Image (cartoon, helix red, strand yellow):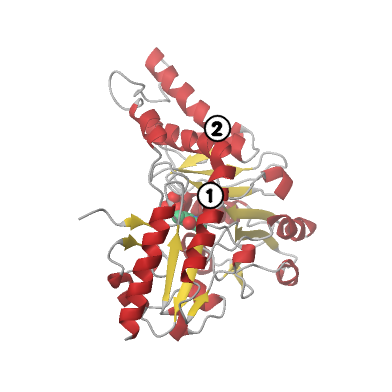
Amino acid sequence: MNAPIYLDYAATTPVDPRVAEAMSRHLTLDGIFANPASRSHMPGWQAEQAVEGARRQVADIIGADPREIVWTSGATEADNLALIGFMRANRARGRHLVTSTIEHKAVVDTASALEAEGFEVTWLTPGSDGRISPSRLAEAMREDTVLVSLMAVNNELGAINDLAALSAVVHARGAAFHVDAAQGVGRIPLNVDDLGIDLMSLSGHKVYGPKGVGALYVRRSPDIRIEALIHGGGHERGMRSGTLPTHQIVGMGEACALAATEAAADQARASALAGRFLDGLDDIEGIHRNTDVAVAVPNIINLAFDGVDGESLLMALRNIAVSTGSACNSASVEPSYVLRGIGVPRSRALTALRFSLGRFTSEADIDTAVAEIRHAVTALRR
Ligand SMILES: *Cc1c(COP(=O)(O)O)cnc(C)c1O
């Protein structure tokens, strides 16, 4: 049997072959494998050079200085480091954090853990388009608000927040702005200075890099202070200890360099493919768009199918790989908290599937997917 057509790019992207090739040169004895912290020999210096080259590639795509990039194991760790590290380091200034109910679990669960630790959290609710309103944010800001954490692009809906307008509200009140940009890199422009971002979480595996690597951008001017969560050899200027995984880091750097040159073409193709997909499904009755395509990235499309259980549809679509809700909660039958969060009724949320496409999706893939969905939906409704 052929491999299923992959339409789950929002859960993870395949590693671009050019990235895999760069990584493979940083593993074995004939490559650059040494510990980048080894200062006493040439192989160590070469590894350090490779890491610093990648640091610049990541910094470049967000308009940052390489010294503002802290390597982590992924966006989950970056979110933890940003929220916990910042709130603990700034507790003398205030204990209030603002975030939203439809953030990724890496932010939602971290904010809940901070509540249990004695910090206070205000949970903003989004509009039905999945975006956070700057005026709602302004109402939530308090004297003791020190941090606001909102995502760039929602992983289930594709909705894009107006980061410039939100950051203006945050900074007018003297707080710092953290953005989870795991789904944003390579999809929308993300210049930290233009958008006024102080902390930003990135992930390797959402941009055709490897899993298990990410980064936290930490602004140097004005200086943003965070406390380390992982202690050890004082790597990453004391903010995140642990031997740097050179091959992972080189992979993430290469992936970002490719995104810098290919993002525009990737997104233009995604737009055309998304249009083809939605046109193809247009004449099937009872399909609702949970994604408001006017304010979303083109590569994520969340649809609800009247009268069809999402789990059953997923099973029936044997030749396409998609997810119900987000991959992170697909093990449970609870409807997606993100769909519930934008006001989708429980019964409709249970009929939803998320289709996400990417760099390697073809027109033929889309046509096959449309035909499969038509067939499965018709059969399940019968
Ligand atoms: C995937 C994702 C994460 C988690 O990233 P990892 O690198 O897998 O830890 C966090 N936030 C968002 C929005 C994501 O899409």
Residue at which label 1 appears = 269
Residue at 79%, 58% in the rendered image: 172
Image quarter where the C terminus lies is: bottom left
Q: In the rendered view, would you say 105 is above or below 308?
A: above
Residue at 71%, 60% in the rendered image: 166
Q: Please state which amino acid type lies under the numbered disc 1.
A: Arg
Give SS at disc 2. Answer: helix
Residue 238 image point, x, y percent:
52, 37
Q: Counting other residues with Cα less than 10 Å from the Cα at mark 2, is it few (<14), some (14-19), or many (20 or more)? A: many
Residue at which label 2 appears = 57
Residue 206 image point, x, y percent:
46, 49
- Specify the quadrant of the image occupied by residue 169: bottom right
Q: Is residue 297 left or right of residue 336?
A: right
Which of 304 and 371 lies nearest the eye of the viewer? 371
Residue 92 image point, x, y percent:
66, 56
- Specify the quadrant of the image occupied by residue 62: top right
Q: Is residue 55 left or right of residue 23?
A: right
Work out which residue is located at the far left of the displayed protein and give it.
1
Which of 206 and 179 lies nearest the eye of the viewer? 206
Q: Is residue 240 visible?
A: yes
Q: Please state which amino acid type lies under the numbered disc 2.
A: Gln
Q: How many marks?
A: 2
Q: Looking at the image, tell me whether mark 2 or mark 1 is earlier in sequence order.
A: 2
Inter-mark Cα distance, 2 to 1: 24 Å
Which of 185 and 115 lies nearest the eye of the viewer? 185
Q: Is residue 97 visible?
A: no
Image quarter where the N terminus lies is: bottom left
The answer to whether mark 2 and mark 1 are in CB contact below 8 A is no
